[in-house]
């Protein structure tokens, strides 16, 4: 193993080592290193400009790292691929395709479209709560439903890792809470490895096994916090003292950063 | 809502025709200056019965159709090339911008000189007028393809070709259709004006011949037929848009 690390009992699903990203002179990410086990639900929180979305995009292969490496099951990531499914912040649905055909675009692009892929995708649409809406067009759906299609589309390629970039940010507060419980329900079915970027600390704690707290200038991993809350989780969990303690702790880690960015940069 | 709006539109049309009829019969009362709708209808009937109408319409329709199809094919192809290649855009853009703003219809007499009095001089005029909106819209449509949608497809490891076929083409479709729709009116103008400069038959020729003979009912008859053709084709396109690109509606 590189860098003299101890060999883990099980090899990590995702390994990030010495990851750096520079945009010209600006150092966006500095020396990110983390091992993520198979089936872990990981959230990344941090102030604006901490590079959490850039980090996710590098793991997705949508952007190149300036230094360091990302490995999935031991093989380095060189570009996008269907071993990862990306759930975008805006749903990015194709308006000319039905819900089903939107969800099927991954297998189609990968050349794995088949009757089996179709029936699996139909199952996924049922899982995300869209049974009966397969032939609808995106313009006929609400924001929450569109994000469900977004999720089903990423799952349709049966990725090893699900990458989610603030998928609920554009939803109203109530829809967002519902989608959080929906996501935990869906995740319990398959227990995929998930990397979930969010601004919302309570969302991160509620969903995750581990929360990675990023700091800014340059973006770096400040602390990784294990969330030892029982599963399956329901919304009531958010009112328990344990939950609130986690949220307060994470908030204390990023508060100064957020204050800096709000006061001095207007954002 | 929609029903009542259609009703109002129909009423407005009928009312307008009635006022026109009344004006020309009671106030102007001279078919040298203004033909009444009833006289125009009668003129169309007479032209149809004599077989003249079919002859004129056939010629004009052929000129329009040939020119329109050629312009559409070339226009879409040029738009594709310009969207794909910066160099092609650099070479073509100044000409297209320049010629689009130029009233190229003024070149019709020149085309007549080159290609003779037959239909091909008119076809060329139609091409020069229809081509530009099609090129410009196709190119714009392809270029405004959402980067987010492209990135979504890239996340699945899509190739350039897949991005083009699955994202760029369908998102450009509404623009291409809009360009083709704009081309209808311009193409009809091209046919008529080109025929005015010199032709043996066609609706434009019917107009100029009727004007020379101060036969206002026949002149209006040709205009009404052209207008009807324009309205019908535009309506056809609107219907087509609803079927082909329904996501741009409502």
Image (cartoon, grey):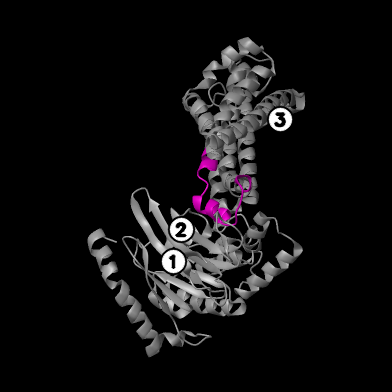
How many callouts does the rendering have?
Answer: 3
Q: Residues within 10 Å of mark 1 (few under 14, many from 20)?
A: some
Residue beneath label 2, please?
A68
Q: Secondary structure at mark 2?
A: strand
Q: Residue at x 52, y 21 (%)?
A: B104
Q: Residue at x 38, y 50 (%)?
A: A23
Q: Are marks 1 and 2 in contact (CB under 8 Å)?
A: yes
Q: Chain of mark 1?
A: A
Camera-side mark, 2 or 3: 2
Mark 1 or mark 2: which comes first in sequence? Answer: 1
Q: CA distance from mark 1 to mark 2?
A: 9 Å
Residue beneath label 1, please?
A33
Residue beneath label 3, please?
B45
Percent x, y of residue A94: 58, 56
Farthest top residue in view? B113
Residue segment shown in magenta: B140-162
Q: Residues within 10 Å of mark 2 (few under 14, many from 20)?
A: some
């Amino acid at each position: 193993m590189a860098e003299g690390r101890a060999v883990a009992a099980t090899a990590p699903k995702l390994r990030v080592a010495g990851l750096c990203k520079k945009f010209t002179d600006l150092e966006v990410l500095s020396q990110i290193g983390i091992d993520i086990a198979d089936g872990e639900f990981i959230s990344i929180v941090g102030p604006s400009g901490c590079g959490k979305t850039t980090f996710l995009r590098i793991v997705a292969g949508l952007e190149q790292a300036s230094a360091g490496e990302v490995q999935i099951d031991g093989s380095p990531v060189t570009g996008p691929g269907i071993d990862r499914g990306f759930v975008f912040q805006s749903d990015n649905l194709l308006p000319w395709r039905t819900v089903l055909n939107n969800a099927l675009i991954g297998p189609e692009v990968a050349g794995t479209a088949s009757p089996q892929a179709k029936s699996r995708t139909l199952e996924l649409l049922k899982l995300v709560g869209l049974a009966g809406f397969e032939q609808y067009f995106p313009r006929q759906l609400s924001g929450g439903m569109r994000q469900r299609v977004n999720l089903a589309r990423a799952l349709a390629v049966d990725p090893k890792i699900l990458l989610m970039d603030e998928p609920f940010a554009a939803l109203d507060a109530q829809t967002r809470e519902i989608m959080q419980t929906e996501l935990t329900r869906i995740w319990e079915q398959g227990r995929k490895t998930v990397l979930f970027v969010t601004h919302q600390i309570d969302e991160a704690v509620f969903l995750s096994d581990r929360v990675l707290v990023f700091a800014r200038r340059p973006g770096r991993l400040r602390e990784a916090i294990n969330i030892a809350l029982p599963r399956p989780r329901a919304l009531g969990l958010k009112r328990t003292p344990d939950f609130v303690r986690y949220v307060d702790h994470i908030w204390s880690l990023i508060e100064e950063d957020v204050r800096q960015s709000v006061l001095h940069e207007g954002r | 809502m929609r029903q009542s709006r259609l009703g109002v539109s129909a009423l407005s049309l009928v009312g307008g025709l009635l006022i026109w009829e009344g004006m020309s019969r009671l106030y102007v009362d001279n078919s040298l200056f203004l033909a009444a709708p009833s006289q125009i209808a009668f003129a169309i009937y007479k032209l149809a019965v004599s077989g003249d109408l079919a002859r004129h319409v056939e010629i004009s329709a052929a000129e329009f159709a040939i020119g329109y199809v050629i312009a559409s094919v070339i226009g879409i192809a040029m738009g594709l090339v310009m969207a794909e290649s910066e160099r092609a855009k650099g070479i073509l853009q100044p000409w297209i911008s320049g010629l689009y703003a130029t009233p190229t219809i003024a070149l019709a007499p020149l085309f007549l000189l080159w290609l003779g009095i037959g239909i091909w001089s008119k076809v060329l005029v139609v091409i020069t007028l229809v081509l530009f909106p099609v090129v410009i819209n196709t190119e714009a449509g392809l270029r405004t393809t959402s980067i987010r949608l492209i990135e979504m497809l890239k996340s699945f490891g899509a190739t350039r070709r897949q991005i083009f076929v699955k994202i760029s083409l369908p998102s450009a479709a509404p623009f291409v259709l809009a360009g083709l729709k704009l081309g209808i009116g311009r193409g009809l103008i091209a046919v008529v004006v080109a025929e005015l400069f010199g032709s043996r038959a066609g609706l434009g020729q019917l107009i100029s011949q009727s004007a020379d003979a101060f036969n206002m009912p026949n002149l209006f008859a040709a205009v009404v037929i052209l207008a009807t053709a324009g309205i019908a084709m535009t309506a056809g396109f609107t219907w087509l848009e609803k079927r082909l690109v329904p996501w741009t509606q409502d």
